[in-house]
Image (spheres, rainbow, N blue to C red):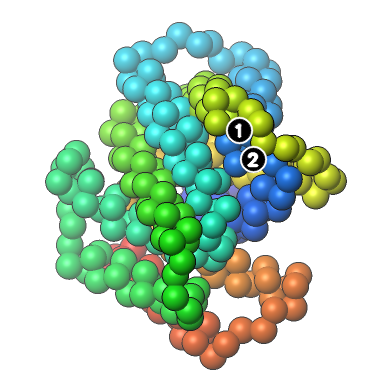
Amino acid sequence: MMREGLLVPALYALICLIWGSTWLAIKIGLAGVPPFLAAGLRFTLASGVLFGLVAMRGTGLKLTRDDKICILSCGLLSFALSYACVYWAEQYISSGLAAILYCMMPLATALLSRFWTRSETLTRRKIGGISIAMAGTAVLFWPGQGVSRAELAGTAVALLSVFSAAVNLVMIKRHGKHTDIYVMNALGMAIGAVLLLLLSRAVESRAAVSWSRDNVLAIVYLALAGSVTTFLSYYYLVKVMEATKLSLITLIFPIVAVALGRIFLHESLPASAWSGTAAVFAGVAIAIVPV
């Protein structure tokens, strides 16, 4: 069995790799499928798989007060609100810009952890590292032309998603120490799926749906890899890492996107991309490596 000392960085890297690819997968999944329906189907499939895993493990569904808080937080703040915002926003902004905006999450998490739950200290080193990494990510993806009204709306909604995800992370860190991550994710995703599908029924009922091999595969990938695998890994790390350090994962997403674009799409990288990448890694190191 892999020792915890190796398991933590391995899971960290896995999450970065998979979630770094999900921005593109969401874009593909939205081709022909309305955003709330696409997100709802993603979490319907993912929760079904997780309930199967819960049954295989023989885990009971007897829930404590903290368990219920965590499940509701995941269902309402993460899987419903945050992903509704992400999917809606990616109709109007690029996947790269959406990844940039998620780089605000470490700062939001650090502020919430310091001033709301008072569970972490907010040192100058941590703030400095986060700021440097955020600046490096902006260099990687910041758009060179003006922003339209639609992009502005998408940006605002994406920022709401970031704040919602940060609140959820701090809530799970505070109440989820003993919560079973399989049960929490299965029930949380089920709640999110129901709310997203109800929202789709309310506002997207007349939208035309055009299924294709690509958008079906994207939804399946997002459910199995981007939801089941990553959220089980993510909420395991929540139990063993500081919330702010864990949230620094969001600073690595854009680098993964650049690498995948270069490998699979043969996209060329401007000179600024290398300096931006170096700044992200330097910032993360400053924030999380002890002196």
Residue 228 higher or lower than 139, as above or below? above
Q: Is residue 105 visible?
A: yes
What crowding class fits label 2: few (fewer than 14 Cα within 10 Å), some (14-19), or many (20 or more)? many
- Check if mark 1's residue and mark 2's residue have beta carbons within 8 Å: yes
Residue under the point 17% across and 62% down: 123
Q: Is tag 1's residue or tag 2's residue first in the polypeptide sequence?
A: 2
Residue under the point 55% across and 31% down: 203
Hey, which quadrant is residue 226 in on the image?
Answer: top right
Quarter of the image that includes the C terminus = bottom left
The amino acid at mark 1 is Glu
Q: Is residue 66 left or right of residue 17?
A: left
Q: Is residue 137 visible?
A: no
In the picture of the structure, the residue carrying the numbered disc 2 is 34
**Where residue 65 sits in the image (x, y, percent)?**
32, 15
In the picture of the structure, the residue carrying the numbered disc 1 is 204
The amino acid at mark 2 is Pro
Residue 47 higher or lower than 288, as above or below? above
**Where residue 146 sits in the image (x, y, percent)?**
44, 75
Quick one: SS at disc 1? loop
Residue under the point 37% across and 47% down: 160
Quarter of the image that includes the N terminus = top right
Quick one: SS at disc 2? loop
